[in-house]
C-alpha cells in the first residue's frame, strides 16, 4: 500500500480519491499460491501488477461481486406463516 501512497487504485482510475485499507490480488491466491506475496507477474510477455491497493467498498463491489450476491440471499426475510 505504501507503493500506491495509500490510494484506492480503482478510484484513482476514475479520477477520484479514496484511502485504501486493503490489498487485492489480481490473480486469486487459491489458484496461484506462488503469487500470493508477489507484486507483479508476467502474462503474454507483459509484466502486470498482482497486488493493488483498494478501499473496502471497491474490494467488495468491484473485485468480489459474488460475495454481495451471496450476502443478499442471506439477508432475505422469510415470510412468517401461521398455518
Image (cartoon, helix red, strand yellow):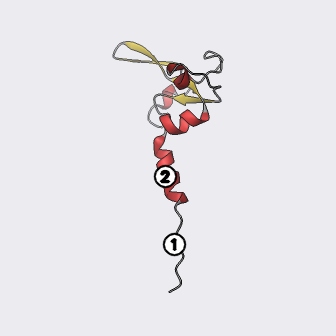
Which residue is at a point 47% across and 49% down the rendered structure image? 69
Which marked residue is nearer to the observer: mark 1 or mark 2? 1
Q: Residue at x 53, y 52 (%)?
A: 71
What count of labels does the image hold? 2
Placement of 62 over or under 71, stated as above or below: above
| Residue at x-position 49% and y-position 27% | 34
Residue 81: % across, % down? 52, 80
Q: Nearer the viewer, residue 23 or 13?
A: 13
Describe the element under mark 1 as helix, strand or loop.
loop
* Residue 4, above or below 31: above
Instruction: Please rate how many residues cluster around mark 1, counting C-alpha atoms within 10 Å: few if below 14, some from 14 to 19, many from 20.
Output: few
Quadrant of the drawing holding the N terminus = top right
Mark 1 or 2, nearer chain start = 2
Q: Residue at x 53, y 84 (%)?
A: 82
Cα–Cα span, label 1 and label 2: 19 Å
Q: Which mark is residue 29?
A: none
- Which element carries disc 2, helix, strand or loop? helix
Question: According to the image, label 2 marks what residue?
Answer: 70
| Mark 2, other Cα within 10 Å: few <14 / some 14–19 / many ≥20 | few
Q: Disc 1 vs disc 2: Cβ atoms closer than 8 Å?
A: no
Closer-to-camera residue (15/29): 15
Q: Position of residue 42 (x, y in %)?
A: 41, 17
Mark 1, residue position: 79
Q: Residue furthest left?
A: 44
Amino acid at each position: 500500500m505504501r507503493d500506491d501512497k495509500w490510494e484506492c487504485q480503482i478510484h484513482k482510475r476514475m479520477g477520484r480519491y479514496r484511502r485504501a485499507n486493503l490489498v487485492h490480488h489480481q490473480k486469486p491466491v487459491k489458484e496461484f499460491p506462488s503469487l500470493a506475496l508477489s507484486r507483479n507477474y508476467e502474462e503474454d510477455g507483459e509484466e502486470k501488477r498482482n497486488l493493488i491497493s483498494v478501499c473496502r467498498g471497491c474490494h467488495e463491489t468491484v473485485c468480489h461481486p459474488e460475495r454481495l450476491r451471496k450476502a443478499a440471499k442471506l439477508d432475505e426475510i422469510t415470510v412468517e406463516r401461521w398455518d
